Image (cartoon, coloured by chain):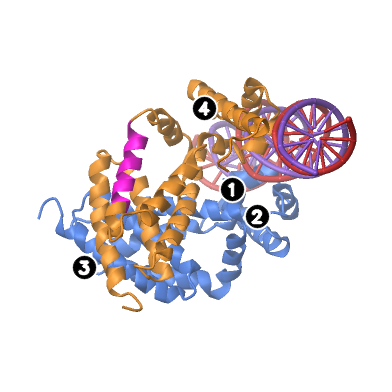
Chain colours: A blue, B orange, C red, D purple
Amino acid sequence: MTVPPGRRERKKAATRQKIADTALRLFLERGYDAVGIRDVAAEADVAVTTLFSHFASKEALVFERDEDFEQRLSQAVTGRAPGEPLIPALRREIHALVRHCTAGDAAPVWHLIDQSPALREYEESMGLRHAESLATAIAADPDLALTTTACRTIARFVIDAQSLARAATDPAAAVDEIFGMIEAAWEVACSSRPVL
Amino acid sequence: MTVPPGRRERKKAATRQKIADTALRLFLERGYDAVGIRDVAAEADVAVTTLFSHFASKEALVFERDEDFEQRLSQAVTGRAPGEPLIPALRREIHALVRHCTAGDAAPVWHLIDQSPALREYEESMGLRHAESLATAIAADPDLALTTTACRTIARFVIDAQSLARAATDPAAAVDEIFGMIEAAWEVACSSRPVL
DNA sequence: TGTTAAACACTAACCGTTAGTGTTACGGTC
DNA sequence: GACCGTAACACTAACGGTTAGTGTTTAACA
């Protein structure tokens, strides 16, 4: 894991990165729908099958780093300071994520996403995956001891917050507004906990 | 609108219905992935292009009546008794929808959906559309006067409730549990309303 | 009755994706 | 240092959903 990876793995990672970079460049230049898989493969100088051995779908080329999202959310739960309440920790994380999407160098990519129905649909479905893994992280916390349904619900709400805030005119304010609502939902879930 | 439709429209509706029925029968018999569009078209005795002039995609064949969902949700808001609070009205509607999905003659169809990733993804994306139209209905109620963000948030939560409850072991109990949380979120949204 | 628009049909293709089949090239082992 | 197993990569050919292009029939309406 921590030892310097062999040439083979370096080459593999390089190929993957070259494909992803090429794809993103072409998508930004010409638009997502105007670029075919065969174009990307040719420009990256790999075979189509090679491309699909690195990425599960055309959409996955755009969401190359989506596992980071998933991990960051889970770690906001599992890695928070002892005794720190859950919702503020999540709120901080969502603030950071939304900022990352609406400003900074990732913004053009999100602009691309907003314009392609296929990408938006894929993003939603990613969101569900993230919500499920977040729910698992919440359910695993012994300090909380909530219903499965309550964990899943809160997780969904948090993902909704990210998605809704991105679309709002003032994203940061929207995060706060929605998290006010989530906080209240959270307290209901805690107070009707099965075993106190 | 209310006059008896002409022969042309009756024929069109009949063709559409025949396609939908044939598709659903084949899907239930052989499984969604094992049936191709060309199979459905041949069995319904229409051309493939005709099929696609009635349905936008293969998945849409399964969710033939999804506009009913959308309308029922909006009507639960706009058509509720004067003075009736919003959330209980929505809770009733979601209870009915969840019951319809988990029991009754629609249950086999939902079993089909649960087993196909393509159908699940399509359903989510339908859910977003439903949430957006529900949000519009909520925003249009002059008694409420909420932020756009608050309306969208509540609408999403309600759609989440439907989706989460369907997957729970006791769907009806899950609806109540989640709506307890939604009610709390709702009150926060109301109390921090822009103009009282 | 004739005009027009819409429903329908057919062919042929496009595009994402995958199966099948080899061909390298690297890493670990003797 | 030669050897073997394996994983990355390549190539062809196809499959399945979807659409463009081009007619042909049918029914509403003047």
Would residue B57 be seen by someone viewing this image from the given angle? yes
The magenta stretch spans residue B92: yes
Q: Provide residue A83's location: percent of width, then percent of height.
A: 19, 68
- Subunit of label 3: A
Mark before the other along the chain sequence, 1 or 2: 2
Q: Is residue B109 left or right of residue B185?
A: right
Q: Of A192 and A123, which appears nearest the observer? A: A192
Q: Of D12 and B14, which appears nearest the observer? A: B14
Same chain check for tags 3 and 1: yes
Segment colored magenta: B90-103
Give the distance between the C-alpha atoms of the residues marked 4 and 2, in whole angstroms.
40 Å
The crowding category of the residue bearing disc 4, from other C-alpha atoms within 10 Å (few below 14, some 14 to 19, many at least 20), is many
The magenta stretch spans residue A37: no
> Which amino acid type is marked by label 1?
His
Q: Provide residue A3's location: percent of width, then percent of height.
A: 46, 58
> Which amino acid type is marked by label 3?
Pro
The crowding category of the residue bearing disc 3, from other C-alpha atoms within 10 Å (few below 14, some 14 to 19, many at least 20), is few
Q: Which mark is residue A54?
A: 1
Residue at x-position 20% and y-position 60%: A188
Same chain check for tags 4 and 2: no
| Contact flag, marks 1 and 2 (Cβ < 8 Å) | yes
- Residue under label 3, please give it: A82
Mark before the other along the chain sequence, 3 or 1: 1
| Contact flag, marks 4 and 3 (Cβ < 8 Å) | no
- The kind of secondary structure element at disc 2 is helix
| The quarter of the displayed image where residue B147 is located | bottom left
The crowding category of the residue bearing disc 1, from other C-alpha atoms within 10 Å (few below 14, some 14 to 19, many at least 20), is some
Q: Which mark is residue B24?
A: 4
Would residue A10 be seen by someone viewing this image from the given angle? no
